[in-house]
Amino acid sequence: MKRSFLASSLIAAAFALPAAPAMATPFQCPTRGGDLVFGQEANVNSLDQMTSSTISTRNIAMNIFETLMTRDENNNPILELAEAMEEGADGLSYTFKLRHGIVFHNGKPMTSADVAASFDRYKRIGLQRSTLDNVAGWDTPDPFTFIIRMSRVQPTFIEALSSFSVPIVIVPAEMKDDERQQLRTIGTGPFKLLEFVPGSHAKLGRYDGYQPNTAFEQRTGFGGYRVACLDTVTFRIVTEASARVAGLETGELQGVEDVPTRSLASLRSNSNITILPLQNWWIQIALPNTATPPTSNLAFRRAVQAALGMEDIMDAATDGNYRLNVGFQYPNQPTYTDAGKETYNINNAARARTLLRESGYRGEPIVILTNRDYPAMYNAALVMQQQMQAVGINASLRVVDWPTSVQMSQQVNSTEWHFFHSGWGTQPALGALATMQFLVSPGANYRPRDDKDDPDVLAAWNDMNNLRSEAERNAAYARMQTLVLERAYAYPFGALTKVQATRATVQNFVPFRIPRFSNVSMTR
């Protein structure tokens, strides 16, 4: 059956839904102008969306770059730079008709040649290039048509393509050969890059050549009808929580990415500040390095798993603002499963010591890699270290900044660390497929030797992507989660609540997985 939809249509599961009723007029900025300064909690060393999965990169870059498809407010796929898409009757092709009048920030009109070049770069070095595993190739029959040809039918392809976890952003064709982490920052979005100083700030300015997507009337998710009301947005790196709070109180900052729990009472009493909580912000998690001993030993990984008490870890990580959570989805999501729950929150020192003896562990130093940019990660790592030490593991912390920790964690066959602390936020929100892609090559987060997947995990992943029925794919997800937990390829601790805040002068800033500054304005 042939499937097609226009940009204002949504896809829920595998079915196209009709467009929402048209509103009278598209969004209009209540005011224009203003310079908004946003306090971001973590460093960022690159704005290359194709080769970074970090929240800190995504926060900034997604206001600059755009994609063929993205997600709406409820995480359903929608079109962005395309105005229509049609799936072939045999499921082996997807034909995209591009929107006319799209111009890059350097003044170059966008055509299908730019889309093809962007896909070429992603296939070469994209961090989640497994998205294209079932793609045979692509064609550009004319400047506004881009055709993806599949080598096999993949029912989940549109779900994968529309993920903004590590999106295939569309850039000018001449940037096709830019190396990893060195992509020039030229997109099609409502804001363009004015200045970027790693470790300090990134300043964006309104792009007057931006063409809003007129198939919509409002912003939705990271798509829809978007305009830049503000003159500039400056992402200032403010790693100290107290400094973010102080900046918000004085008005030096008009918004902040994170407010510590201990500061909420005083901020709520301030009529000049708006508190914006968002539950299930991320899953606090640690990943083992299975390429190097002793974390290459399953009994050792299970010993660590048995030693962990999740309440103490999450309480320290979040000042008590958390929920225990089995696995890699949240209980309110349709794909949630507690499969593998017997591995979670064991907190049994005697069992841990027994498994340590089985593993042959002899007191070798164990390095826990973490950062101070995200206090939740650092505090979780600190308690994990203490719980490991309590059962006889010689654990120590290696503390670097967030971008450095990510770079270290991505090195194949690294011997510099044994456990890496992170937070999975955007991916769980996007669904099981986006989340579990973290656990397969290239770059499986548990770092298997030579980047070679566990064949059982890979088989479950392939079933998640390719089985025809949703029920079968969900069962494959449950099987993959069970395998990952039983083989201790990941240690999910729980889900934390993120609290953001803005000055009361900021209008239409709505918490989302990434801070959105289109359609945001400031009163004078």
Image: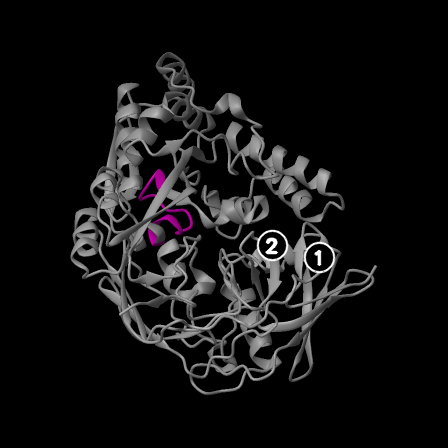
**Residue type of the residue flagged with mark 2:** Asn
The residue carrying mark 2 is: 76
In the foreground, 372 or 78: 78
Give above or below for 482 relative to 189. Answer: above
Q: Residues within 10 Å of mark 2 (few under 14, many from 20)?
A: some
Q: Quadrant of residue 297?
A: top left
Q: Quadrant of residue 505?
A: bottom left
**Element type at mark 2:** loop
Mark identifier at residue 112:
none
Give above or below for 144 relative to 246. Answer: below
Can you tell which of label 1 and label 2 is closer to the viewer?
A: 1
Taking the magenta stretch, the answer to whether it contains residue 250 is no
Does the magenta stretch mainly form a helix, a strand or a loop? loop
**Residue type of the residue flagged with mark 1:** Leu
Left or right of 412 on screen, residue 371: left
Query: For the residues marked 1 and 2, what is the alpha-carbon distance in whole angstroms?
Result: 10 Å
Left or right of 356 on screen, residue 429: right
Q: Position of residue 308 (x, y in %)?
A: 37, 24
Q: Position of residue 65 (x, y in %)?
A: 46, 70
In the foreground, 395 or 215: 215
Residue at 61 percent across and 78 percent down: it is 99
Give above or below for 384 relative to 358. Answer: below
Mark identifier at residue 17:
1
Instruction: Give the mark count.
Output: 2
Quarter placement of the C terminus = bottom left
Q: In the rendered image, is residue 138 in sight?
A: yes
Q: Position of residue 225 (x, y in %)?
A: 53, 69
The stretch of residues the image draws in magenta is 407-421
Quarter placement of the N terminus = bottom right
Q: Earlier in the sequence, mark 1 or mark 2?
A: 1
